[in-house]
Amino acid sequence: SDLLEMRNIHKVYSNGTRANRGVSFSVRHGEIHALVGENGAGKSTLMKILFGLETPSEGEIFYKGEKIEMRTPKDAIRYEIGMVHQHFMLVPSFTVAQNIVLGSEPRKGALSDHKAALLETDRLIREYGLKVDSSATVARLSVGLKQRVEILKVLYRGARLIILDEPTAVLTPQETDELFHSLRKLVDTGYTIIFITHKLNEVMSISDRITVLRAGQTVTTLNTAKTNKEE
Ligand code: ADP
Ligand code: ADP
């Protein structure tokens, strides 16, 4: 069933740029859905709207069948939507664990003291194969490891729908394989992933469905899940 539906989204920026011209995009619970399009196709704008960073000029958003308003990122977090940006927002002098806990309301039911936070962080690291030392200083980590910290941060916050913006751009081929493995584990345990990319070929094997955007409009949605299972 649809977890998220963005219906007929339009966005005209104040300078007149029409970034989204009637985009419809729906995401099913428990899938990896790739949002593919060339630079300038309107992917980031659509995701900024979903995350409450931009206001749509027109269009509606439904979450779990209910019409919702995304006014600020706080709304997105309340709906358990998490975003992993291309540009990380980590404090370099802090440890991995400190960064994960920093500024986050802990997930529902989690204890908020430091020890409990560390245990929770280590559990997430083990469970999803996001191998990183929770006591390491972030400044010393490679970009690939920093990205894992960002992913852990949204998991710790309790996100259930996770948006990854061009996640492989900063990764080595081996790190890409590891990321894909972690994403599969996440959806297998009930998470839902939106994977934004301008490279169609890289998401053919990892995604269940692919939506292609061109010039601010939805071109098509492809179902790739069946092909994956037959491989
Ligand atoms: P809005 O129209 O939503 O008010 P702004 O024009 O104020 O948006 O720009 C918001 C941010 O986006 C600014 O940081 C600006 O530098 C950046 N920006 C402006 N134009 C572009 C563009 N063509 N492509 C990408 N980013 C842009
Ligand atoms: P993509 O993520 O697919 O590269 P974007 O949503 O970033 O696409 O951009 C879609 C169009 O909107 C582009 O023409 C871009 O220059 C423009 N754009 C993006 N952000 C802004 C902004 N803040 N103000 C004005 N134009 C923008």
Image (spheres, rainbow, N blue to C red):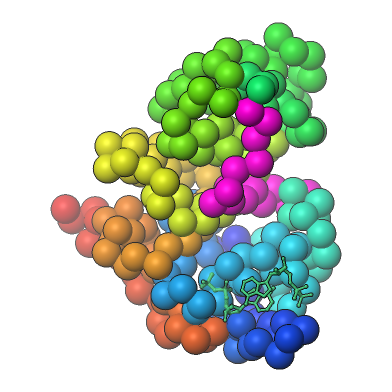
Specify the quarter for ligand 1. Answer: bottom right
Residue 107 occupies which quadrant of the picture?
Answer: top right
Number of marks in picture: 0
Prevalent SS, magenta region: loop
The span shown in magenta is 78-92
In the image, residue 203 lies at what x, y percent?
33, 59
The residue under the point 79% across, 14% down is 113
Name above or below for residue 171 compared with residue 66. Answer: above
Residue 211 occupies which quadrant of the picture?
Answer: bottom left
The residue under the point 62% across, 13% down is 119
Residue most extreme to the left: 231
Q: Nearer the viewer, residue 224 or 86?
A: 86
Q: Is residue 77 visible?
A: yes
Magenta span includes 8: no
| Left or right position of 172 against 105 | left
In the image, residue 118 lies at what x, y percent?
64, 14
